[in-house]
Structures are given as structure tokens and as C-alpha cells.
């Protein structure tokens, strides 16, 4: 309980000459302050450093806290001077001095500098005869969706959890941000690989798969096929249903950052799994000219060229452009599977004034080749075989037939308009087409001799078109001592998928001594299925700021519809779902950089079909309780989060217990299932010294089937490991030279809910070496070389969901990358 005396004591402490504001500044006195001070810029650098910035209208202490973290400098002042004052919205590439002048305009306060610290004091009252003082002109330029693009390894703000550019400490949910610099540091070649050192995240659950990003968050599938990966806040089309399995996969070089928002977030995004979402942000045009080219290779024969050009198109910088592109060819660890990719991401920003911004975003990506995903038998892989071990390179298709070709084409825009003193209108739109041809001669059945595999041939041509529109209006207002950041929004999604398919036969294959060239007998593809998905939702969010408290509340109503036309059977299903979801979260900011938080949130996913009595199934619902604490001292690159949570998913379909109940000639289902995940997560980035950065994560998950009328009751949820541990250190060993070493341990898990198959634990080591060649020879300024080794010791890993569904993990990949920036 905070008493009046306590508040007075805080005010007295804040009144010292270099004291921090009520919300943020005592953190410099913590044990990590020495390392932080060494990393702070000089006075001249801090004054001249122009950084992109986007802050909402909010209490002045909150704005000063955000500026302190963003520019890595101390900002102090008497709390009594700041109390009750509100800073306006601040947007644009600004120096710290410009940002402070904007924040303090009209408050009767000004900021003075002493060394590396800034102090807010009362502005002197001018003499009546003195001429009016004119402030330095501040040019404010909107940055579009997602707010400012932070630089560096550690982010302090995120967009995905609130659809506003909110400080991580003030966001009452667990959020992790992987910045562009961090992705490059890890040598990540995909979104999946960039998330390997985050708490609550499991990657590569189904082994190596070149088609998609396979990601699980808090025990629930979140990756490409689960369709819980968002690009610029908008959901791309996708499906994991049988022959219509179709997904997007965006090249990670075209991304500026990746955010993982943990827990149910339907309040803002509609139908999502309760584990959370992954939100990717595209690279956007920059105010200042920048150019990068690069070459990359690896031990699998990769040849790749990258290009990233950006900057203004005219002198007054009202037109900005960016072009990001790459072309690559690579072999893989699977025989006869090569991968080819071309992608092209152009973008153009038009900002006619500081109140208007429109960014056009394009994407074209072409993937050609096969798929490393293989259905392998357990015999000779996870179980002993009298014929030995099946190599990790084994290919079970036909080289002349198998292929996985995909084209992605997208066009959209991000629009932002400021109105009045505190209003913002945002609209984000994307139209996308995905064309995919998947042909495979797959052998999935092992005969009694233990080595002969038989199967079938399939050919599928999928075409998906989709449009996503998200429009919201934000407005900041005061009600007494409370500042509200209100947001009212409406989003719409429409996806249509058409599948043409054919099936046939293929000759048998010896698993241990394969001879390819078997005949594939298959007819022409015929239209087989059309699927339409529609969702529109109305949502309301209010972020309340009062003293050191932040309260975030949200409510949403969704209308969704799934319709499927089975052209082969001439049957049609039409499922409609209504759902109301909400959340509430609270955060308290302590002066030392600690921020305890708690939240409750819900989610839904549509459920198709009906029970024996003809009642349509209700949506699958999720709910989460979470509490934790975050820590990020002002001006430091340290960020630590600890949380405890419980997620319950209900209305899961289970077999109808009455054997006499038949639906369409088969088994009926009821919605009696429930799953529960209880977890502990610890995640942190800590600068031990200015030269040594540590990243660590610990995950504990107790995942169980808590309600069922089948034999899985009380069993552990499939493919959810109990523990995941990750630790990585990056050390600047000398001028231009840095070294990295990391280890990732994933505990044992069951392959299915019946717990009839158990997968062993695995430990993977990674290493990196980076060198700035400009430090060796000034003629090579801007040129950097990096060498990354994923799975350094070439650990062979296997994951199985059953005796005929096993998958090898990624073998050792050593990649070399040479970039030139100017």
C-alpha cells in the first residue's frame, strides 16, 4: 500500500539535483550503472544524435522516461514540477534536444545539460519589455505503422501487443523483440532461426522443413501452417488442411524486426491460438541514404546475393524509397532437394507534412525446388533396424517428379494521419496472392521386410487470394489526473483458396539402398476443393496512465465464417462463429527500472462441423492468467523479464462416447476436451561489461490434457517439452573483432497426446565470428565479414509423432557472409 507519507518521501528523493523523475531515473544508481555509463554517448554525440521517435500524448514523466531510455542518457528533475503535466504526441527523426523542446512546450519548463545528464527546471519568466523568445523549429515526420524503427540489439518499445508504439516496460504482457541487428548477430537465415534464444519458444518441432517457419509458443503451434504469423500487423492467407495445406514464408532479409507476443491476443487480432502470435515488420524507407550489398555461402552450396538501398528521392525528404532484394540457390541436407529463391520488396513513403504519412509496400517472392520435409519410419532412425541407420540425407520421393514451387505477390499500404492535438488515424491494407504447386511421390509405409517402402503420388495446385484491412482511430485525453490513450478499430479479412488435385501410384523404394526412377502413374489435376474464410471484428482498447500505473483494457466482438465446397463429393459446409474476447492488464513502474505486471486475456479459434444432434460446434476458446516482472534500467541495454502463467484451452473436439452415434457414416465428435499449460519463463539480455553481452532464457511448461473422454486424459500435451534452456554470449574481443557462442537445450517431449511416443532431449551449440574489415584497413571501410555455425557439433536429432512419422533435425550449417555498407 502506498501511503501519503511514502509519496512525499519519493518527491523529496526526486528533488535532488540529479534525481530521476518519479517513473524512471533512480535506475542509474543500480549495480549495473557502471557498465551503462561506459556505454553512454558523449555530450556532443547525444546532442547531435538524430533518432526516429514516436511517442503518444501521455504524462510528462512517462515521456521523459521514454526519452531517457531511447537516447541512453539521464534526464532528471524535481517531481513536483512534473506532476500533472502532459506531453504531446512526439513523432519523427529528432535529436534529444528537439524531442525535449517538443515535450516541454507550453509547460513552463525547460531542459538544461550538464555533462551527459539533462535536468528539467522551471523556465525563467521574461521581463515584460523583453522580446518574445522563439523556440528552435522542430520538424516532425510520421513514421507509419509500428512507430519508430529502433536501432541496436535491445528494443525498448513494441507494436504487436497493443497496436501502438508502447514501451515494453509499460506493456502488461510478455513480449520479446528481435531487432535487425540481433538477427544479423545470430546469422539467422529465417524467422524461425531468429527466435531460438527466446523463452517460451520452441523451433524446429517437426525437424527440417524448407517450406515454412515451424514455431511453437507456450505449447501451441504458432508458425506458418498455424497461420499465427503476422506481417506488419496483418494476417497472411494460409491453411494446414490436408491437400489444401498452403502457407506463406517471408524471407527474413526483408524484415526490420520480429516480435513475439505471448498469450491470447484475440482482442486485437481475432482468431489466434492462445499461445500468442509472431508479428514481423517489413523494412521501410529511411530518412537518410543507406546502401548495402552482400554475398553469402555455406557448406550446403548456398550462393546468395543481397541488396538493400534506401533514402530520400527529393531534397525536402517528402518522398522516401527502399528496395530490398535477394537471389539464392542452395543444396540441402536431403538428397535431390535444391532450393532457389528470388524476392523483391520495394516500398515508397510519401510524407507531405509532419501530420501525414503513406507508405506503399510491395512483395514478390518466388521459391522453386523441392521440400526437405520427409515422412520417415521410426525403424532405422529412432529405433534399431537390422539393416543399420537411415542417413539424414535420405529422400523418399522421385527426383524427376517431386517439387514444391511457390509464388507470393503482395501489395499494400500503411497510412497514418494526425488530427487535432492528440488524434491519430491509421489504416493498414494488404492484398496477397499465393500460387503453389506441390508434387510428391511419397513412400510412407514400411513393409514387413523392414526395408521396402510403398506409397502414393499426389499433385496439388493451390491458389490463394486474400485481403486484410485494419483501420483504427487513436485519441489521447485527460480525465482528471488520468491520461487515456483510446483506440477504436475495425478489421476485415477475406481469404479464398482453390485446390486442383490428382492422385496416383509410384513404385516401391528400398529405404537403405534406394534406386530411383520408378514410374509415377498419375492423371491430370482436377478441381477438388474451394475454401473461403471471412472475419471481421470491432475492437476497443484503452491505455490508462496515472502516476506510476498503467492499466490496459480491451474488448472485441468477432464475426467469422468458414465455407468449404468439396467439388469431388459435391458437398458444402458453411460454419459461422461469433466470439467476444477481452483482456485487462496492469503495470507499475518503479524508480529502479522494475515493472511488475499482471494480465488476464482470452482468445478464440473457429471450429467447423456439428455434433450428432446437428448443433454447430462452438469456437475453441483460450484464457490466460499471467503475472511477472520486467527490468530495464534507464539508458542501459539490459532487459530482463520473468513471468508465471496458466493457459486453458477449452471446447476441444473429442470422439463421441456413444458408439451408435454416426456422422456422415463415420465417428461423431463432441466438444468435451480441455488442455492446460502452466509455465515459468525467464528471459534476459545483460551487458556484463561494455564488451560482453549475455542472452539467456529458461522455460518450464507443465502441459496436460485436463478434460477428455478418450485415452489421453491426464497425459502430457504432445510436442510440448517440459524444459527449454538457452544461453548465448557475444564478446567484442578486439578492434573490429567479436565472437559469439550459444547453447540451446530442449527437453524430452511426447509426440502425441496419447503419450505413446517419446522424443529424446537435444542440445545444440552455435558459434559466430564477426570482423569489421575497416578496422584492419581504412580502404575497406564499411565492409564486414561474419562466419556463423548453427549446430556446431553436428548433433543428429530426431522428432517423431508416431512409428511412421519421424523427422530429422537440421544438421550443421556453416555460413559465411560478406557485406558492404556505404
Image (cartoon, grey):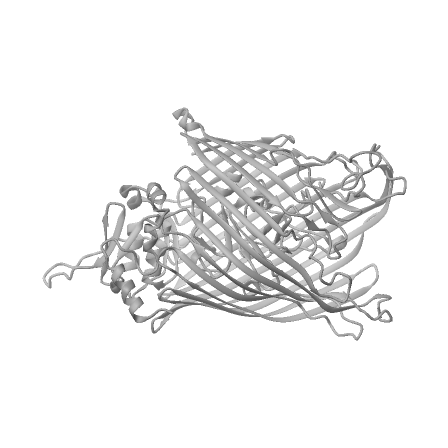
Image-quadrant location for residue 479: bottom left
Relative to residue 609, is residue 234 depicted above or below? above
Residue at position x 41%, y 57% in the image = 594
Residue 144: x and y in percent read 45, 55
Name the spot of residue 283 as percent of width and height, x first. Answer: 50, 46
The vertical placement of 821 against 427, above or below, is: above
Number of numbered discs present?
0
Image coords of residue 7 (percent x, y): 30, 67
Q: Does residue 312 appear left or right of residue 665 in this picture? A: left
Residue, x 40% and y 55% (percent of image)? 142
Residue 217 in picture, x, y percent from top left: 60, 54
Which residue is more in the foreground, 80 or 485? 80
Q: Nearer the viewer, residue 710 or 310?
A: 710
Query: Is 624 rendered above or below residue 501?
Result: below
In this rendering, position of residue 806 left or right of residue 472 = right
Q: As rendered, which of 326 and 483 lies closer to the eye? A: 483
Taking the image as drawn, is residue 238 in sight? yes
Q: Is residue 56 left or right of residue 645?
A: left
Residue 512 location, quadrant: top right
Q: State which quarter of the image contains the N terminus.
A: bottom left
Amino acid at each position: 500500500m502506498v501511503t501519503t507519507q511514502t509519496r512525499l518521501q519519493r518527491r523529496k528523493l526526486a528533488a535532488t539535483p540529479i534525481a530521476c523523475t518519479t517513473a524512471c531515473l533512480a535506475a542509474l544508481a543500480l549495480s549495473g550503472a557502471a557498465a551503462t555509463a561506459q556505454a553512454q554517448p558523449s555530450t556532443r554525440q547525444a546532442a547531435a544524435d538524430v533518432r526516429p521517435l514516436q511517442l503518444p500524448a501521455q504524462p510528462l514523466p512517462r515521456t521523459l522516461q521514454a526519452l531517457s531510455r531511447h537516447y541512453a542518457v539521464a534526464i532528471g528533475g524535481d517531481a513536483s514540477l512534473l506532476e500533472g503535466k502532459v506531453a504531446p504526441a512526439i513523432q519523427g527523426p529528432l535529436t534529444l534536444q528537439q524531442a525535449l523542446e517538443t515535450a516541454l512546450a507550453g509547460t513552463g519548463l525547460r531542459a538544461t545539460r550538464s555533462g551527459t545528464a539533462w535536468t528539467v527546471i522551471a523556465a525563467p519568466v521574461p521581463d515584460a519589455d523583453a522580446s518574445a523568445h522563439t523556440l528552435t523549429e522542430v520538424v516532425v515526420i510520421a513514421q507509419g505503422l509500428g512507430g519508430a524503427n529502433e536501432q541496436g540489439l535491445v528494443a525498448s518499445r513494441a507494436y504487436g501487443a497493443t497496436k501502438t508504439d508502447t514501451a515494453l516496460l509499460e506493456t502488461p504482457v510478455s513480449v520479446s523483440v528481435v531487432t535487425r541487428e540481433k538477427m544479423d548477430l545470430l546469422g539467422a537465415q529465417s524467422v524461425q532461426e531468429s527466435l531460438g534464444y527466446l523463452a517460451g519458444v520452441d523451433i524446429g518441432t517437426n525437424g527440417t522443413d524448407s517450406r515454412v517457419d515451424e514455431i511453437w509458443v507456450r505449447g501451441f503451434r504458432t508458425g506458418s501452417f498455424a497461420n499465427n504469423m503476422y506481417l506488419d500487423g496483418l494476417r497472411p492467407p494460409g491453411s494446414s488442411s490436408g491437400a489444401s495445406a498452403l502457407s506463406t514464408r517471408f524471407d527474413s532479409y526483408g524484415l526490420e524486426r520480429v516480435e513475439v507476443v505471448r498469450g491470447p491476443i484475440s482482442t486485437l487480432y481475432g482468431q489466434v491460438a492462445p499461445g500468442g502470435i509472431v508479428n514481423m515488420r517489413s523494412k521501410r524507407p529511411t530518412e537518410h541514404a543507406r546502401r548495402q550489398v552482400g554475398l553469402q555461402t555455406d557448406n550446403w552450396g548456398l550462393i546468395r546475393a543481397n541488396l538493400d538501398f534506401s533514402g530520400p528521392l527529393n531534397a525536402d525528404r517528402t518522398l522516401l524509397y527502399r528496395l530490398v532484394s535477394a537471389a539464392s540457390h542452395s543444396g540441402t541436407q536431403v538428397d535431390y532437394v535444391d532450393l532457389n529463391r528470388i524476392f523483391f520488396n520495394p516500398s515508397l513513403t510519401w510524407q507531405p507534412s509532419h501530420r501525414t504519412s503513406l507508405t506503399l509496400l510491395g512483395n514478390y517472392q518466388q521459391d522453386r525446388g523441392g521440400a526437405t520435409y520427409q515422412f520417415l519410419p521410426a525403424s532405422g532412425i529412432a529405433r534399431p533396424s537390422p539393416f543399420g541407420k537411415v542417413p539424414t540425407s535420405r529422400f523418399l520421393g522421385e527426383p524427376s517428379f517431386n517439387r514444391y514451387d511457390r509464388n507470393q505477390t503482395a501489395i499494400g499500404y500503411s497510412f497514418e494521419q494526425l488530427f487535432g492535438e492528440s488524434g491519430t488515424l491509421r489504416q493498414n491494407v494488404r492484398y496477397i496472392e499465393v500460387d503453389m504447386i506441390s508434387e510428391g511421390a511419397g513412400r510412407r509405409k514400411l513393409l514387413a521386410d523392414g526395408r521396402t517402402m510403398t506409397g502414393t503420388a499426389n499433385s496439388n495446385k493451390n491458389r490463394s487470394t486474400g485481403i486484410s484491412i485494419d483501420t483504427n482511430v487513436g485519441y489521447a485525453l485527460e480525465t482528471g489526473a488520468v491520461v487515456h490513450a483510446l483506440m477504436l478499430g475495425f478489421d476485415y479479412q477475406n481469404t479464398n483458396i482453390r485446390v486442383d488435385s490428382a492422385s496416383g501410384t509410384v513404385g516401391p523404394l528400398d529405404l537403405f539402398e534406394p534406386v530411383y526412377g520408378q514410374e509415377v502413374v498419375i492423371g491430370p489435376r482436377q478441381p477438388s476443393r474451394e475454401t473461403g474464410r471471412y472475419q471481421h471484428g470491432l475492437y476497443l482498447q484503452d491505455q490508462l496512465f496515472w502516476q506510476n500505473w498503467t492499466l490496459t483494457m480491451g474488448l472485441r466482438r468477432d464475426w467469422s465464417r468458414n465455407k468449404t465446397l468439396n467439388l469431388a463429393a459435391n458437398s458444402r459446409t458453411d460454419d459461422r462463429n461469433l466470439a467476444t474476447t477481452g483482456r485487462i492488464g496492469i503495470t507499475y513502474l518503479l524508480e529502479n527500472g522494475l515493472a511488475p505486471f499482471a494480465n488476464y486475456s482470452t482468445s478464440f479459434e473457429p471450429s467447423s462441423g456439428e455434433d450428432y444432434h446437428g448443433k454447430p460446434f462452438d469456437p475453441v476458446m483460450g484464457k490466460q492468467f499471467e503475472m511477472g516482472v520486467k527490468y530495464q534500467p534507464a539508458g542501459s541495454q539490459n532487459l530482463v523479464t520473468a513471468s508465471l502463467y496458466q493457459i486453458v484451452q477449452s471446447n476441444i473436439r473429442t470422439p463421441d462416447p456413444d458408439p451408435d452415434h454416426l456422422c456422415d457414416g463415420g465417428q461423431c465428435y463432441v466438444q468435451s476436451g480441455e488442455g492446460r499449460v502452466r509455465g515459468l519463463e525467464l528471459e534476459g539480455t545483460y551487458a556484463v561489461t561494455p564488451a560482453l553481452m549475455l542472452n539467456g532464457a529458461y522455460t518450464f511448461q507443465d502441459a496436460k490434457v485436463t478434460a477428455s473422454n478418450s485415452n489421453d486424459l491426464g497425459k502430457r500435451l504432445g510436442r510440448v517439452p517440459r524444459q527449454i534452456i538457452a544461453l548465448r554470449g557475444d564478446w567484442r574481443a578486439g578492434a573490429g573483432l567479436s565472437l559469439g557462442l550459444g547453447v540451446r537445450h530442449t527437453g524430452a517431449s511426447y509426440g502425441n497426446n496419447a503419450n505413446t511416443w517419446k522424443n529424446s532431449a537435444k542440445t545444440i551449440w552455435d558459434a559466430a565470428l564477426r570482423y569489421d574489415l575497416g578496422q584492419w584497413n581504412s580502404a575497406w571501410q564499411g565492409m564486414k565479414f561474419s562466419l556463423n555455425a548453427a549446430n556446431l557439433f553436428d548433433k543428429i536429432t530426431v522428432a517423431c509423432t508416431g512409428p511412421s512419422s519421424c523427422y530429422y533435425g537440421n544438421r550443421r550449417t556453416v555460413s559465411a557472409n560478406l557485406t558492404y555498407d556505404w
